[in-house]
């Protein structure tokens, strides 16, 4: 059981890295071109990464039999909560704590990654 959970978490992290490329590229592009601030840039990147995450996690991480009609609303609810958590953490870390936006994003990513893994494993894609 623990080995299977560990293997699944490693696949989730690998998918997360792919999603993070989309997320971080969007964030950096928006912030560095001054098209958006760090919070808006992070949230825009979150949406890009979220699409990548759903497609890859459904197929490779959780190998879910749940229909898209059943999984998408659940994934969207978890993603919505993670979106709010991302916005709050980025705001708190950049605006209140004065941390550089990339360090703030790394901390935020780690926290959100762990929370969403368990939420998606047991609820979104669970049997």
Image: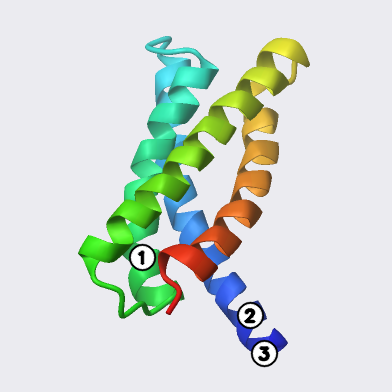
**Residue 126, percent from left and from top:** 45, 74
Using the image as rendered, state which of residue 125 and residue 105 is in the foreground: 125
- The local secondary structure at tag 1 comes to helix
Using the image as rendered, state which of residue 72 and residue 27 is in the foreground: 72
- The local secondary structure at tag 2 comes to helix
Residue 71 seen in render = yes
Which quarter of the rendered picture does the N terminus lie within?
bottom right
Residue 101 location, quadrant: top right
According to the picture, the residue beneath numbered tag 1 turns out to be 56
According to the picture, the residue beneath numbered tag 2 turns out to be 5
According to the picture, the residue beneath numbered tag 3 turns out to be 1
80 horizontally vs 113: left or right: left
Q: Is residue 33 above or below residue 21?
A: above
Q: Is residue 109 above or below residue 6?
A: above
- The local secondary structure at tag 3 comes to loop
**Residue 53, percent from left and from top:** 40, 56
Q: Which residue is found at the position 58% from the left and 34% from the top?
A: 85
Q: Earlier in the sequence, mark 1 or mark 3?
A: 3
Q: Is residue 83 above or below residue 2?
A: above
Residue 28 seen in render = no
**Residue 100, percent from left and from top:** 69, 21
């Amino acid at each position: 059981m623990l080995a299977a959970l560990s293997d699944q978490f490693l696949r989730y992290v690998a998918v997360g890295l792919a999603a993070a490329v989309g997320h971080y590229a969007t964030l950096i592009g928006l912030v560095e071109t001054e098209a958006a601030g760090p919070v808006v840039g992070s949230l825009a990147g979150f949406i890009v990464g979220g699409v990548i995450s759903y497609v890859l996690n459904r197929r490779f991480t959780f190998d879910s039999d749940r229909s898209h009609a059943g999984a998408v609303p659940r994934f969207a609810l978890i993603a919505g909560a993670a979106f709010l958590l991302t916005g709050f953490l980025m705001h708190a870390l950049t605006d209140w704590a004065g941390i550089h936006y990339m360090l703030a994003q790394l901390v935020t990513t780690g926290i959100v990654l762990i929370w969403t893994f368990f939420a998606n494993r047991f609820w979104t894609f669970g049997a």
